[in-house]
Amino acid sequence: MKPAKLHYWILGCFSMALCCWCTSDKFHQSDSHPHTWKKLYLAHHWPVTVCKQTAANDCQDPPEYWTIHGLWPDKSEECNRTWHFNVTEIKDLMSDMRRYWPDVIHSSLNRTHFWKHEWEKHGTCAATLEVLNSQKKYFGKTLELYQHVNLNGYLQKAGIKPSSTYYQMTAIKEGLTKFYGVTPKIQCLPPEEGEKAQTIGQIEFCFTKELQLRNCTEPKGESSRLQTDLQLGTRELSVCNDTLPVYYPSQVQHRK
């Protein structure tokens, strides 16, 4: 090879290597990277409370079981605004999606805005994991984790069911922690004026990047998710107060 050609060949190889290194570094996560996250929240919400929480909705006969709200990486949102939701990619999951991950406040089976929101806000960040790096993988794996946790089955066995009487928050929390071996995050609607009980609304289980259950609590000094994912109305969920009784409503229109 002539010296001049060799010179350009070496420069070309160097440029390609540098380009690959830069591309790789672009997706490398560090503690200072805005899209870095450490755990996933699998959020279940109680449809009756979702309907109560939302000022404007067309809730019609909400499911009488806990449904999926979302699978959320902590500390990151909307990681790729060009990766748009495409419902055709999850067409094989549609039956389970409509049953276990319904849009509670919009009862039409054709509405996909809720799933679009969850993918574009959270799925694009979760996609840094190979096991979640497509829309089908993200929604499919979330459904698998939901079935694995089987929150509805546990609550039924434990005798914790919707009732007009109140529960103690500590009893619910301790029961969940003992059964699952980890501490979940439980959120409630605070009492309205003149009420003494908070209303249970959401139960979140946390997973490592290896999709193993872990505590949702953080060591002192570390932050966690500040609020629930969607602020659906004028009333917002917050971490339940251990000292207040808990209302687990059975119907939207009845509240004591």
Image (cartoon, rainbow, N blue to C red):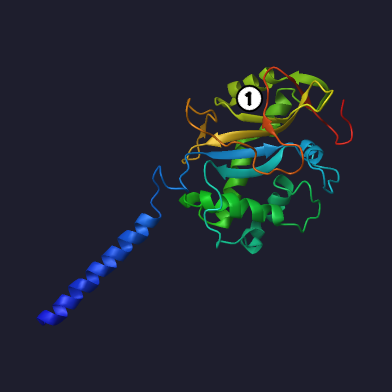
195 up-or-down from 100: above or below: above
Which quadrant of the view contains residue 93? Answer: bottom right
Residue at x 46%, y 52% (from the top left corner) = 130
Check disc 1 and report the residue beneath it: 176
20 up-or-down from 130: above or below: below
**Residue 52 horizontal side relative to residue 4, left or right:** right
Which quadrant of the view contains residue 30? Answer: top left
Residue 236 spot, x, y in % from top left: 72, 36
Which quadrant of the view contains residue 158? Answer: top right
256 up-or-down from 60: above or below: above
Residue at x 65%, y 58% (from the top left corner) = 92
Circle 1: element type: helix
Quarter holding the N terminus?
bottom left
Residue 38 spot, x, y in % from top left: 47, 39
Quarter holding the C terminus?
top right
Q: Foreground: 52 or 123?
A: 52
Residue at x 14%, y 77% (from the top left corner) = 6
Quick one: which residue is furthest to the front in this view?
193
Say if residue 248 shows up in the picture.
Answer: yes
Quick one: which residue is furthest to the right in this view?
253
Residue 187 spot, x, y in % from top left: 67, 31
Say if residue 1 shows up in the picture.
Answer: no
**Residue 12 horizontal side relative to residue 159, left or right:** left
Q: What residue type is labelled 1?
A: Leu
Report crowding for label 1: few under 14, some 14 to 19, many 20 or more residues within 10 A (C-alpha).
some
Residue at x 57%, y 51% (from the top left corner) = 123
Give the total of numbered labels: 1
Residue 111 spot, x, y in % from top left: 75, 57
